[in-house]
Image (tube, rainbow, N blue to C red):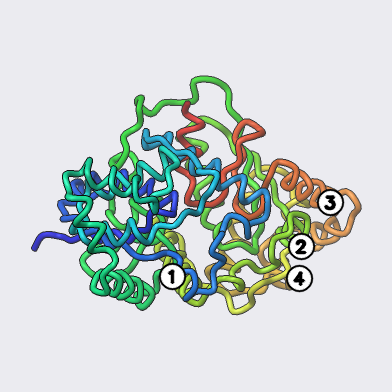
């Protein structure tokens, strides 16, 4: 049977726009038929108690990063993207018009282009008419039908169906009625293809054309940092750029930038459930064991100081891998001295004694302060050439291509 790839979207999300520019090609690579599923993002946000103006609810470094993140993906995809000054703009009329036209791909592309490339208000009658006419539809007929109860109820029902599926944002992919994949950056997971298969590099992969630097900021308390740390050395080998590890105290960073102390706890139940599955999928993709710990959050300050108290090189790396695995795969208490002694091995008492020295304590303070200075607001944070910040273990494709530029 042929595969069916569903794409849930609303025009008001820049990442849904980005995903829409690749969805047809992705479906073709998968040998799947593409089915567009318009939904009203505002209704999804209300059901999940998410702020309607999400960007304004983010701490400044996160908002700045996310804007740059959009531009990086747009550059990778080779498409225009400009944040309209009046974003978010009303989309309900455009979504209803999309339904009336049978989710015509030309209509969808036209509304996205108007919003994200031209900065036009797609709720305005003249913009609606222009997009519909350009796609070959009778604009008067379509606009007359979008006010009917039938079309209004259709969009409402589709939105309710999405909420029932556990959708809390867009874009979302779903293959053959299976699990949902949130985010345009989840194309590899939904398709089973690599990024190089989805978007071949512009030039053959090669070591860095000129000297780059790469810093990785992390804390043992983050599951995403665990997954990122495990991929760092392979990234260094592929790019010929060594990684400089910067352990930081995530709680202290959160206080400095104004982030909630436990961001996961602020998420809706739907988002928490999704990320529980997403973490497992991400771990399986790199062959890493994963089990969400019974002690969360945990104090990681002792473990971080142990890392800094160890001599640089192999012992630090061995301890970091062991500590990450102890917490995120074995559910062990890495704040306990007995556990730390077992993870340290030879000379454990001496290493633990060093964690209490002013030098080691200050090293962690300095590394955390450095993280805030470069614009970090979470873990893992990758910093290329001392200035370009990438957040998340799922941004490795962007980091790698920057290092090979």
Are the residues flagged by discs 3 and 4 in contact, CB closer than 8 Å? no
Instruction: Give the residue at mark 3.
Output: 360
Instruction: Give the residue at mark 1.
Output: 44
* Horizontal side of residue 205 vs 140, given as left or right: right
Q: How crowded is mark 4: few (under 14 residues within 10 Å), some or many (20 or more)?
A: some
Q: Is residue 169 visible?
A: yes
Which label sits in the foreground, 2 or 4? 2
In space, the residues marked 3 and 4 are separated at their CA atoms by: 17 Å
* Horizontal side of residue 83 vs 182, given as left or right: right
Instruction: Specify the label residue 301 is tagged with.
Output: 2
Pinpoint residue 295: horizontal percent, then vertical percent: 64, 77
* Horizontal side of residue 152 vs 3, given as left or right: right
Secondary structure at badge 2 equals helix
Q: How many marks?
A: 4
In space, the residues marked 1 and 3 are separated at their CA atoms by: 47 Å
Q: How crowded is mark 1: few (under 14 residues within 10 Å), some or many (20 or more)?
A: many
Which mark is first along the chain, 3 or 2? 2
Which mark is first along the chain, 1 or 2? 1
In space, the residues marked 1 and 4 are separated at their CA atoms by: 45 Å
Which mark is first along the chain, 3 or 1? 1
Image point (66%, 53%), residue name = 377
Pinpoint residue 249: horizontal percent, then vertical percent: 74, 57
Pinpoint residue 349: horizontal percent, then vertical percent: 81, 63
Q: In which quarter of the image is residue 220?
A: bottom right
């Amino acid at each position: 049977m042929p595969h069916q790839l569903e794409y849930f979207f609303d025009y008001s999300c820049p990442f849904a726009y980005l995903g829409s520019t690749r969805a047809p090609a992705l479906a073709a690579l998968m040998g799947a038929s593409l089915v567009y599923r318009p939904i009203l993002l505002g209704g999804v946000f209300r059901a999940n108690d998410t702020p309607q103006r999400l960007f304004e609810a983010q701490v400044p470094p996160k908002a700045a990063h996310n804007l740059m993140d959009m531009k990086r993906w747009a550059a990778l995809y080779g498409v225009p993207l400009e944040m309209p000054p009046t974003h978010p703009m009303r989309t309900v009329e455009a979504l209803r018009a999309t339904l009336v036209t049978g989710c015509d791909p030309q209509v969808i592309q036209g509304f996205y282009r108007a919003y994200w490339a031209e900065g036009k208000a797609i709720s305005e009658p003249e913009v609606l008419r222009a997009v519909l006419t350009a796609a070959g539809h009778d604009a008067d007929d379509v606009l007359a039908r979008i006010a009917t109860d039938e079309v209004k109820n259709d969009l409402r029902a589709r939105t309710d169906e999405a909420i029932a599926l556990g959708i809390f944002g867009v874009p979302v992919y779903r293959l053959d009625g299976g699990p949902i994949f949130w985010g345009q950056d989840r194309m590899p997971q939904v398709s089973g293809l690599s990024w190089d298969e989805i978007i071949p590099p512009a030039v053959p992969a090669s070591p860095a054309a000129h000297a780059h630097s790469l810093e990785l900021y992390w804390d043992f308390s983050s599951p995403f940092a665990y997954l990122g740390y495990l991929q760092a050395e392979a990234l260094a080998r592929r790019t010929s750029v060594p990684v400089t590890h910067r352990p930081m105290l995530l709680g202290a960073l959160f206080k400095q930038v104004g982030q909630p102390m436990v961001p996961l706890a602020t998420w809706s139940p739907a988002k928490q459930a999704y990320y529980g599955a997403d973490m497992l999928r991400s771990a399986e993709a790199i062959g890493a064991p994963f089990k969400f710990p019974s002690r969360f959050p945990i104090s990681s300050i002792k473990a971080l100081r142990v890392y800094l108290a160890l001599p640089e090189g192999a012992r630090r790396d061995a301890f970091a891998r062991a500590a990450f695995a102890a917490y995120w795969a074995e559910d062990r208490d890495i704040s306990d001295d007995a556990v730390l002694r077992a993870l340290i091995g030879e000379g454990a008492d001496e290493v633990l004694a060093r964690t209490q020295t002013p030098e080691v304590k200050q090293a962690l303070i300095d590394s955390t302060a450095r993280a805030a200075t470069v614009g970090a607001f979470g873990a893992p944070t990758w910093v290329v050439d001392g200035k370009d910040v990438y957040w998340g273990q799922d941004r490795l494709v962007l980091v790698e291509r920057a290092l090979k530029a």
